[in-house]
Amino acid sequence: SQQGEEDPQALSIQEGENATMNCSYKTSINNLQWYRQNSGRGLVHLILIRSNEREKHSGRLRVTLDTSKKSSSLLITASRAADTASYFCATDAAGAQKLVFGQGTRLTINP
Amino acid sequence: ETGVTQTPRHLVMGMTNKKSLKCEQHLGHNAMYWYKQSAKKPLELMFVYNFKEQTENNSVPSRFSPECPNSSHLFLHLHTLQPEDSALYLCASSGGGSYNEQFFGPGTRLTVL
């Protein structure tokens, strides 16, 4: 299976600290995306990194991609209570026409 | 708001009922998707439509029947569901091929009694 796996499954930190989540996958990809989901709601796209990119930034988000290790990380700096959510990575296998989502990391930011 | 709407937001139905979920997008996208999200399980892709044609059916039981009358609307018809079908059903759309950024609706929380 190409399914991504996030690590850790749950993360609880204090407001202001940085949060790092990891994603591993199994097959070659065109791109990897990160999404956020607030409890019981739809997913919101955060950032997309292509297979030929190694790092990408968007505001307080930093994503890295290591295709040799088939892994990616999402760093949220200076976390806020509003960052509390589940975060998912999604990959599209080269040649496949769909995204495959991991199980997600549940992030809790404590005030 | 992401431009993808879903109705109803909550649905409770018995196992013998027939109901339909509706998804609508006004983003000009060509691809639409149905996902099922159950507790403690990864997001499961159910169906994919590209330009109104079904391109993916991920071994979904026939009690779930999708319909895509045009590129802006997607339905999921439900019939004789089981309690284990209770879940959050999410609709999404994307443009320019299935592997672009997907825009999700808020979901329909389905409870099957």
Image (tube, rainbow, N blue to C red):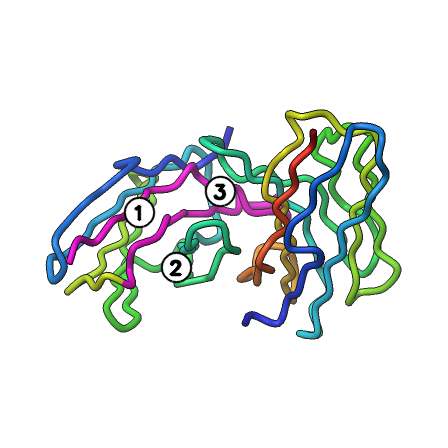
| Residue span colored magenta | A82-111
* Disc 1 packing (10 Å; few <14; some 14–19; many ≥20): many
Taking the image as shown, residue A55 lies to the left or right of residue B39, namely left
Tell if the residue under mark 2 belongs to the same chain as the one under mark 1.
yes
List x then y, in percent, for residue A69.
29, 38
Q: Is residue A85 rendered magenta in the image?
A: yes
Q: Chain of mark 2?
A: A
Q: Quadrant of residue B2?
A: bottom right
Element at badge 3? strand
Q: Which residue is disc 3 drawn over? A: A101
Residue located at (15% from left, 65% from top): A78
- Residue type highlighted by circle 3: Phe
Q: Which residue is disc 2 drawn over? A: A49
Q: Nearer the viewer, residue B85 or B52?
A: B85
Taking the image as shown, residue A21 lies to the left or right of residue B74, namely left
Q: Is residue B107 above or below residue B26?
A: above
List x then y, in percent, for residue A23.
33, 41
